[in-house]
Image (cartoon, helix red, strand yellow):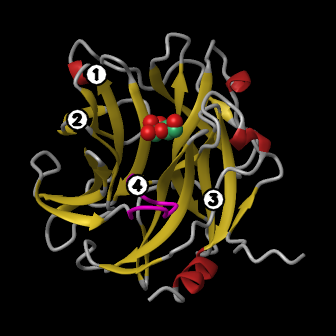
């Protein structure tokens, strides 16, 4: 029987590439890493590490090829700081990294979790050792957020996912200074009914700038009797007005199929928070949390993704 599924994302044969066993200190799970390529070509992952209380912090892992031989920080790199930032009382989760050439700093947008629910927080760093916190930039309930790498029409832009039950859609907000946010625009709506991306969607890695538009990899959450299914879809947005969707694929392109994605602390989850674009300008490394338990890698060709999106007008 032929297989008509699009093979856009390819699981790496060494998956999962990082697990709690690679950590120098006790951890329950490592997953949902943000990613960036440093100027010397090193791949840096900022992994979410869940401790045995259930609270998360962030920890750096570095690799020359982005695949193996990871050097993991011996201690937590960025711990929650609830004394100064009460919104981090129950931990910090799911970082998305965007390098901002204008500031010569990396922006880390992450989920800060506290009694009032999960919200969106922002920190800046130059070296992934010292972090300058700007605090909570979107109040609960909001998550799945990332910055664009440069200003658009003079303003910084943020994708995020506020929850307005029963739907959870992707929104875009603008800011003159990274602290004050407004001009909110609905960017992408969860579909309804039987769709794979009905009711709840969210940004996965930060948006990817291409000549044809901003490429967005997003997750859709399908609620089933057996629990939730996290799968990935693709959409393309206008470069100058990113709230304007140019194309949206009808079908999901990646979902939990491998054993390490189907079984873990949360079954059936493939949840990327980071990508790197290799020097060939085409190969994407997509880093994802597998079943809220480990870190896995999929590769994809940007050209093939854009070609696939061409069919959805
Ligand atoms: C989402 C986020 C992710 C998590 C996923 C699956 O809502 O909280 O951190 O990986 O659920 O549990």
Circle 3 sits on which residue? Answer: 285
Viewer-side residue, 177 vs 170: 170
Asked if disc 1 is less than 8 Å from ligand 1, the answer is: no
Most distant residue in the right direction: 1
Q: Residue at x 52, y 88 (%)?
A: 310
Instruction: Tell whether label 3 touches label 1 (CB within 8 Å).
Output: no
Circle 2 sits on which residue? Answer: 140
Marks 2 and 3, how far apart in space? 31 Å
Circle 4 sits on which residue? Answer: 201
Instruction: Tell whether label 2 touches label 1 (CB within 8 Å).
Output: yes
Circle 1 sits on which residue? Answer: 114
Can residue 3 be seen in the rendering of this structure? yes
Image quarter of the N terminus: bottom right
Marks 1 and 2, how far apart in space? 9 Å
- Mark closer to the chain start, 1 or 3: 1
Q: Which residues are magenta?
A: 191-200
């Amino acid at each position: 029987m032929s297989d008509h599924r699009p093979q856009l994302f390819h699981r790496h044969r060494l998956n999962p590439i990082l697990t709690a066993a690679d950590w120098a200190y006790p951890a329950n799970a490592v997953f949902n890493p943000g990613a960036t390529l440093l100027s010397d070509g090193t791949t840096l992952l900022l992994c979410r590490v869940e401790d045995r209380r259930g609270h998360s912090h962030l920890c750096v892992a570095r690799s020359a090829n982005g695949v193996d031989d990871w050097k993991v920080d011996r201690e937590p790199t960025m711990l929650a700081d609830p004394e100064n930032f009460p919104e981090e009382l129950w931990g910090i989760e799911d970082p998305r990294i965007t390098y901002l050439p204008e500031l010569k700093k990396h922006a880390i947008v992450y989920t800060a979790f506290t009694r009032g629910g999960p919200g969106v927080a922002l920190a800046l760093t130059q070296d992934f050792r010292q972090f300058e916190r700007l605090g909570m930039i979107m109040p609960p309930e909001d998550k799945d957020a990332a910055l664009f790498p440069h200003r658009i029409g003079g303003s910084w832009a943020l994708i995020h996912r506020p929850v307005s039950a029963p739907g959870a859609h992707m929104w875009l907000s603008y800011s003159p200074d990274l602290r004050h946010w407004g001009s909110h625009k609905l960017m992408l709506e969860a579909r309804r009914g039987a769709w794979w991306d009905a009711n709840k969607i969210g940004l996965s890695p930060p948006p990817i700038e291409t000549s044809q538009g901003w490429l967005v990899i997003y997750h859709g959450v399908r609620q089933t009797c057996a629990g939730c299914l996290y799968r990935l879809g693709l959409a393309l947005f206008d470069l100058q007005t990113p709230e304007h969707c140019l194309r949206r694929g009808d079908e999901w392109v990646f979902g939990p199929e491998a054993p390490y994605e189907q079984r873990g602390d949360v079954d059936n989850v493939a949840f990327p928070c980071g990508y790197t674009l290799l020097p060939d300008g085409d190969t994407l490394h997509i880093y994802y949390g597998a079943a809220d338990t480990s870190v896995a890698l999929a590769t994809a060709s940007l050209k093939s993704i854009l070609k696939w999106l061409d069919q959805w007008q």
